Image (cartoon, rainbow, N blue to C red):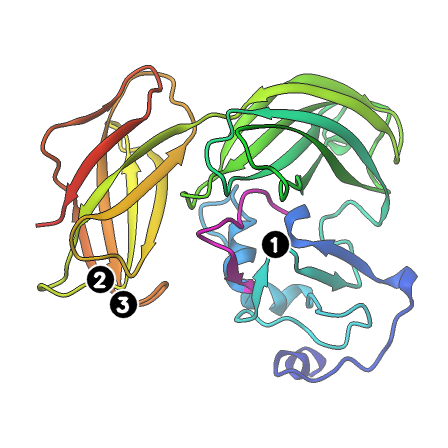
Amino acid sequence: MLALGLGVGCELDTSPGNDDVYSYNVDEIAAGLFGKLSPTMTMNEWYEATQWWTSTPEAYDSWTQRNGYLYKDKNLKTPFTGSDVLNENTVVYCDFSFNGKGKKIGEITGTITLDNIPHPATKVDIYCFSYNGPWENWWSLYKRINMSNVTGTSATLNWSLPVYENLKLDSQATFSLFVLPGDSLDAYEVSVPTGKTISGANANIGDLGTVNIRGVTLSGTINVTDNGQPVPYVEIYVTDDGSALLGTTCLFSPEPTDAAWSVTFGRVNSNKTVTFQVFGYLEKNGTKIVDRYATTSSPVRIINNQSVSGIVLNID
């Protein structure tokens, strides 16, 4: 009965103390989700996106039927529903260890230089992974790097990562970056060559060096209509010649002809011929009205990870 009452917005009858409450910024749970083209998402969408490792991700509304709720406030009075809208600064609260790592006990810090930043609105998350010893000692951490003052294509930045009580510290860790360009819906991963030993809950581990985060950018214009009418929301999927997804971008209320688009994704291992699948909707997450492969005047090929511009996509 309690679970049913919470599901329709009733308040929990207890007010736990601070020692009983766990809190997480949503960008500590999964990286590369919030960007210029996806500044918000529902709780259901976010929770499904955190389950990148499964082919059948579960919605938050379904998960709550077995596991309780995430809350909007530290007093655990107002539970989230699946339709609530989150952004990258949203904090969730609960009375259990949502990430399985226990309570926060500090943060590790350091610096890193990002080179060849691909887009002015690029977002970057730092990811730390320790794999020393048996599997129960493995752990990983995520957090967004603050790039609000970055104006050029290179910058030296401070970063921090939360540390939790159940992590086995004094261990060797590796790092990588999840890069979400401002023209893309998908992040790509870039390895950081420098590893570090995490010696304590509030360790400053110094500089991780310079990391080139350049991607491959495809750009051009698109001509797309539905029965001669404009399409309110368009998504462009770029796949390689083996049908693997390389990147996705979206357009809100594009012009029917010559609408500009671009998409940036991670560098590829070999030269690729790419195809473009275009979806159109009455609104984001709305009714699909277009599902076609675009035609181009000549094949589009990525050679030596060089960007390609001037691509005209036609939806006949």
Q: Which residue corresponds to mark 3? A: 282
Mark 1 surroundings: few (<14), some (14-19) or many (≥20) residues within 10 A: some
Q: Amino acid at mark 2?
A: Val
Q: Are marks 2 and 1 in contact (CB under 8 Å)?
A: no
Amino acid on which the number 1 mark rests in the picture = Glu
Q: CA distance from mark 2 to mark 1?
A: 28 Å
Residue furthest toward the front?
Answer: 151
- Residue 234 at x, y = what percent? 28, 55
For disc 2, the marked residue is 231
Identify the amino acid type marked 3. Answer: Leu
Image x and y of residue 313, in percent: 17, 42
Q: Foreground: 197 or 249?
A: 249
Q: Nearer the viewer, residue 80 or 108?
A: 108
Which stretch did the figure color magenta?
A: 29-43
* Residue at the image point whose x is 52% and y is 29% from the top: 153
Residue 84 in the image, given as x and y percentages of width and height: 56, 70
Going 89% across and 30% down the picture, which residue do you hit? Answer: 200
Give the labeled residue for mark 1: 88
Q: Quadrant of residue 162?
A: top right
Dot 2 falls on a residue whose secondary structure is loop
Pick whichever, 49 or 310, lies toward us: 310
